[in-house]
Image (cartoon, rainbow, N blue to C red):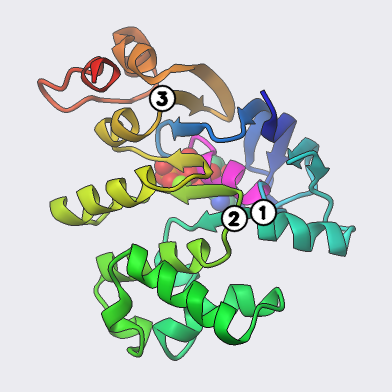
Amino acid sequence: MTPSLEVSGLAYAYPDGTQALYGVDVTIGKGERVALLGPNGAGKTTLVLHLNGILHGGLGTVRVGGLTVDPKDRKGLREIRRRVGIVFQDPDDQLFMPTVREDVAFGPANLGVGGAELERRVETALARVGMLEVADRPPQHLSFGQRRRVAVATVLAMEPEILVLDEPSSNLDPAGRRELAEILLGLDVTMLMVTHDLPYAAELCPRSLVLSGGVIAADGPTPEVLGDEALLRAHRLELPYGFDPAFFARR
Ligand SMILES: Nc1ncnc2c1ncn2[C@@H]1O[C@H](COP(=O)(O)OP(=O)(O)OP(=O)(O)O)[C@@H](O)[C@H]1O
Ligand SMILES: [Mg+2]
């Protein structure tokens, strides 16, 4: 297995002293789709923010396609940010330009993409999430679900090798949730998806990690992880009533 992402011994405390990660080891192979589950405050977002060097300075290492995340290496960090596309928990952390089109163009333009290629990337990314018709509107005039889709498009336009999504299905209506699942299933990238939506994890990710209290509490095939009632209870995870975690494994 060629590793896409290698996290080893990652420990991190915020400047106020809150220890969020206590030594996390995770390896994700190229092309894998992995769910990152865990209760509120477990450290999921903290882990995600380490994957492209937004947070750093604790212990341990993060490697992306063999390249170590090192904030002192400006050129390396640029390459890491090209490889790792993060869709943040809050789309408003991602959208800041006057129009949707400019927001989606921003990342690739920064990497030096221009002209017809830039236009192609923007149109393809927006079409993929069904948001081409809002291309010339200001992002702040869109609904939350629409902003989430545009945020996904800003990352797709970068054509990343690893797509990291922090709670992609939250606040989407049922059709939007299903449409996003179809989009994600159609992408040929390594994926790490933080979610509280366990059926979403079951549908999209063959493998699941449980992060709890800043450590990896479980790592295995999603039907097994979600089938372990004691594990779920211990980490405040709950399946919807009547949901059979083996359903997607049998398909
Ligand atoms: N900026 C910050 N300063 C201090 N502590 C923080 C900061 N951000 C997060 N924390 C703390 O770090 C721990 C991990 O938080 P994190 O946001 O990574 O959890 P999470 O698993 O993403 O939770 P959620 O499911 O609610 O999104 C928590 O104890 C949280 O209070
Ligand atoms: Mg979070």
The correct choice, above or below, for 41 with respect to 210 in the image is: below
Q: Are marks 1 and 2 in contact (CB under 8 Å)?
A: yes
The residue under label 1 is 83
Q: Which of the two residues, 190 or 164, is positioned nearer the viewer here? A: 190
**Which region shows up in magenta?**
41-50
Q: Earlier in the sequence, mark 1 or mark 3?
A: 1
Give the Cα distance between marks 1 and 3.
22 Å
- In the displayed image of the protein, which residue is found farthest to the left? 242
Q: Position of residue 193 (x, y in %)?
A: 45, 41
Quarter assignment of residue 27: top right
Helix, strand or loop at label 2? It is: loop
Count of numbered labels shown in the rendering = 3
Viewed as shown, does residue 221 lie left or right of 58? left
On residue 160, the disc is 2
Q: Assign the C terminus to one quadrant of the image.
A: top left
Is 47 contained in the magenta span? yes
- In the displayed image of the protein, which residue is found farthest to the right? 72
Is 80 contained in the magenta span? no
Q: Which residue is depicted at the point 25% across and 31% down?
A: 199
Mark 3: is the Cβ under 8 angstroms from ligand 1? no
Quarter assignment of residue 153: bottom left
The residue under label 3 is 206
The 10 Å Cα crowd at callout 1, few under 14, some 14 to 19, many 20 or more, is some
Q: Assign the N terminus to one quadrant of the image.
A: top right
